[in-house]
Amino acid sequence: MRPVLFFLFFVSGFAGLVYQVIWTRLAFASFGIITPVLSVVLSVFMLGLSAGAAAGGRMIPWLTRRTGVSAILFYALAEFLIGLGAFAVPALFAAGERLLLVAGQMDSFGYLSLSALVLGFSILPWCFLMGTTFPFMMAFIREQRTSDPTGFSYLYVANVFGAMCGTFLTAIVFIEIFGFHYTLHLAAAGNFLIALICVFLASRQRNSLGKEPIQQQTAVPAATENPGLNGLRDEPCTWILFSTGFCAMAMEVVWYRAFTPVLKTQVYSFALIVFAYLGATFIGSLWYRLHLQKGSILSVAKLMALLIIVALLPVAACDPRLVQMDWRASIYPLSAILTLASICPFCAVLGYLTPCLIDGYAAGDPARAGKAYAINVLGCILGPLFASYILLPRMAEQFAIVLLSLPFFAFYFFGWRKLSHPERMFTGSVAGAITIYALFLSQDFQDLLSHYAARMDVRRDYAASVISLQGTNGGKSLYVNSIGMTTLTPTTKFMVDLPLAFHEGSPQSALIICFGMGTTYRSALSWGIKATAVELVPDVPKEFGFYHDDAPKVLNNPRGQIVIDDGRRFLRRTQEKYDVVVIDPPPPPETAGSSLLYTPQFYDLIKQHLNPGGIVQIWFPGGEKITEQAVVRSVVTSFPHVRCFLAIDGPGMHLLASMDPIEKLTPGQLAARMPESAREDLLEWSSIRNPATYLASVVLREIQLDQVLNTNTDIQITDDDPINEYFLLRQMGLF
């Protein structure tokens, strides 16, 4: 029976992580790529697990007594209903999205509140059912062998192993091959398979409830017989479970931002962090099970001693003096591996500690196990919110890691008398040395940039860390979460000047999606039109004055408006229409979430907000050839009239798209359409003083679409198949 139960919880954990990854992405597409949406999805997911674990532990004894049915049938029902969630959640997201559109234009807070309600209604029931699976299966184990108080840890090992595999295969294989929806169907098939196996097990069960349980030949040592678990069935145990869940999940948020200079912003980076987290947790849990079989579990005091040493290791992985941040360097792969490895000891110790505590607290009782697990997950709910909205806006990542380590130091000092004198001396001195390094000697990406800066400004908010840099050569750059976004380049002027000049008639309004340095927004206002800029990161527009000396004048222009929002989300909640829409997705094209600005679904939304004759400018910064072809195919699929111009400086292209024909105009004719203030703005950084000549450097570099289109019409970016983000198998020649 044990291998079968392991398989069931492996598949359950696998499917659960598939759902979490894909539901989060579908929520981004429906409600915006903003931190509040991510926080709501993760919090609701964890809330469901917590509530389901607590309620399931209380319900299952009553259900089995009242119905006379084995607990495994209730577990089968839960898994079957979870599988239905794979089909229901996307439909609920779509219905909620339509509901919010019917509600009309709202302020961002109102839209966000309703979005949170829709998200909660859509995914909470299925997450609640996921939470019930642990106590339901523990009740079944108890039916079979009443002498085993360690059933939780056995299931926990299988579940974490499945979650680890689910994270890896979803990001690396399934989404690239099947897309989001078919991957969800694959996970649902796993849930349905579990349900069928459980029904079969119930039909073969020889002992009905109330009869003598089956006794196994090999007994697992009782948790209470081990000194490492003594005295942990009351309040200290629950506090430790809450704190470890809180700090571990908060640290995961901090790690993701801290590791960005090394791992970059691809979906694979986040997947690898989660994979390393779950993989080390699995190893730690397996380590605990091996010690359990030997009857020599490590004490909580020793585990806390290990935690205070390993919790601060990721600080070294953020230090540019110790790791290579340039992906083109030969030693970069080693730096990326070491960065991921830095979190593994910490996660392994927690992987040992968590099932150890819950085993000791519950002693096989499903109700107590559900309560303990719920407390741990409650910490997992609050930790990311604390890190995102309180911690990271106020301090650098290495200091955030130190602060989140403080509870482990408190628990260490609470129980350090249980350690031998040599153990206290060793752990105290090593942890003290690492803490001193983290607080006073460590450096981060900001410190690295300071060596090349004549002037630098740093801001932090819930969405990102923003660095504005003026180099010693006078050039200015914008970094968001340590990734270079843009420089002061004429390309950003052409993004809006080209479509406005090609627009037939007198344009009156422009929408710019992605504010950046504000150059495009500033150029749009130089036309004397109404300009609206949408920016995802709140602190980015606050740096406008760092790049442009006339920022106060531009910001006071009554025709201008800057909105902090996701581009899709803004378009869904506004009723405005525009003559020109400028889309400037974040570089590089592989950035997680960037595909949502390149899909026909997004362009269909834009078309609803275009005036007759309106033109959309889509900027592609350059990259993999097949990604370029996919971007162009998505644009051509959505608009009947498309023109393509190469950038004035460096790689990249301007795609102009419209529902109406775009006139063939000479550079001189385009210059004549520009007001004098717009011509002056265009030539601001150029030694060329003739606007027609300057425009010719782009207009005469038009390329035909058949040069950038693949004959395979399936090669395009869609909401369900973001091939620019998921590319590993393709680049390896495997798909």
Image: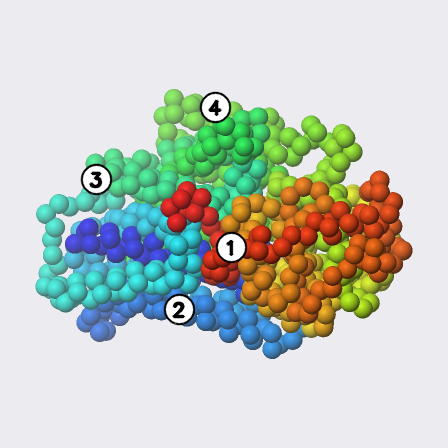
Labelled disc at residue 710: 1
First of labels 4, 2 by sequence position? 2
Whether label 1 touches label 4, CB < 8 Å = no
Q: Which residue does the numbered mark 2 point to in the structure image?
A: 87
Q: Which residue is drawn at 26% across and 61% down?
A: 194
Badge 4 crowding class, 10 Å Cα cut-off, few under 14, some 14 to 19, many 20 or more, is few
| Circle 1: residue type | Asn
Indicate the amino acid at tag 4.
Answer: Ser
Residue behind mark 3: 293
- Looking at the picture, tell me which residue is in the foreground, 653 or 474: 653
Q: Residues under labels 1 and 2: Cα distance?
A: 33 Å
Q: Mark 4 points at which residue?
A: 429
Single out the mark in the foreground, 1 or 3: 1
Amino acid type assigned to the residue bearing label 3 in the image: Gln
Checking the image for residue 225, the label placed there is none
Q: Nearer the viewer, mark 2 or mark 3?
A: 2
Instruction: Look at the picture and state if 524 lies above or below 334.
Output: below
- Residue at 75% over, 56% down: 498
Circle 3 sits in a helix, a strand or a loop, which is it? helix
Identify the secondary structure beneath mark 4: helix
Give the mark, 1 or 4, whose residue is nearer the N terminus: 4
* Image location of residue 711, percent across then percent down: 49, 57
Q: Is residue 570 visible?
A: no
